[in-house]
Amino acid sequence: MAISRTSGQASRWPLPGSGAISLVNAGLEGFVRAAALEAPSGIRVNAVSPPWVSETLSRLGMEGEGGLPASVVAQAYARAVETPVTGQVIEPGADVDG
């Protein structure tokens, strides 16, 4: 069984006015790391920490710079669910799976 949560870049790169969301993201990432240590055998816990999704930026009328395509973000969720990793914060696009 795999449990995957969504955090965000604000845990590592906060912006002015992002205090609350930075707190939530960092807390969630810490929880994932600790929960993986305490989870019963066979239960994996990970987080995916995507940047903005390009398609979302486009729909909002914003420039797509800094965003990743939804297909790349989806690959990170697939990795969290389909591979044996646990206790990880997976950043889409940060590493390329062979």
Image: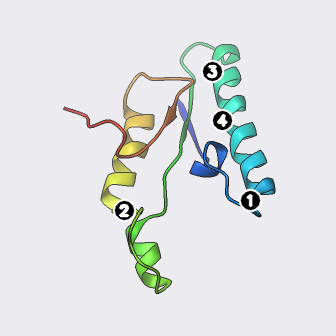
**SS category of the residue bearing label 4:** helix
- Label 2 vs label 3: CA separation? 27 Å
Identified at 67% across, 52% down, the residue is 14
Q: Amino acid at mark 3?
A: Ala
Q: Earlier in the sequence, mark 4 or mark 2?
A: 4
Residue 76, placed above or below residue 87:
below
Q: Amino acid at mark 4?
A: Glu
**SS category of the residue bearing label 1:** loop
Res. 81 image quadrant:
top left
**SS category of the residue bearing label 2:** helix
* Circle 1 crowding by C-alpha within 10 Å: few under 14, some 14–19, many from 20: few
Q: Is residue 84 left or right of residue 27?
A: left
Residue highlighted by disc 2: 70
- Label 3 vs label 4: CA separation? 11 Å
Residue highlighted by disc 1: 18
**x and y percent of residue 43 in the render?**
57, 23
Residue 21, placed above or below residue 1:
below
Q: Amino acid at mark 2?
A: Ala
* Circle 3 crowding by C-alpha within 10 Å: few under 14, some 14–19, many from 20: some
Q: Earlier in the sequence, mark 1 or mark 3?
A: 1
Query: Which label sits in the foreground, 3 or 4?
Result: 4
Identified at 45% across, 23% down, the residue is 85
Residue highlighted by disc 4: 29
Front in this rendered view, residue 43 or 35: 35
**x and y percent of residue 40 in the render?**
65, 15
- Label 2 vs label 1: CA separation? 23 Å
Q: Are marks 2 and 1 in contact (CB under 8 Å)?
A: no
- Label 4 vs label 2: CA separation? 21 Å
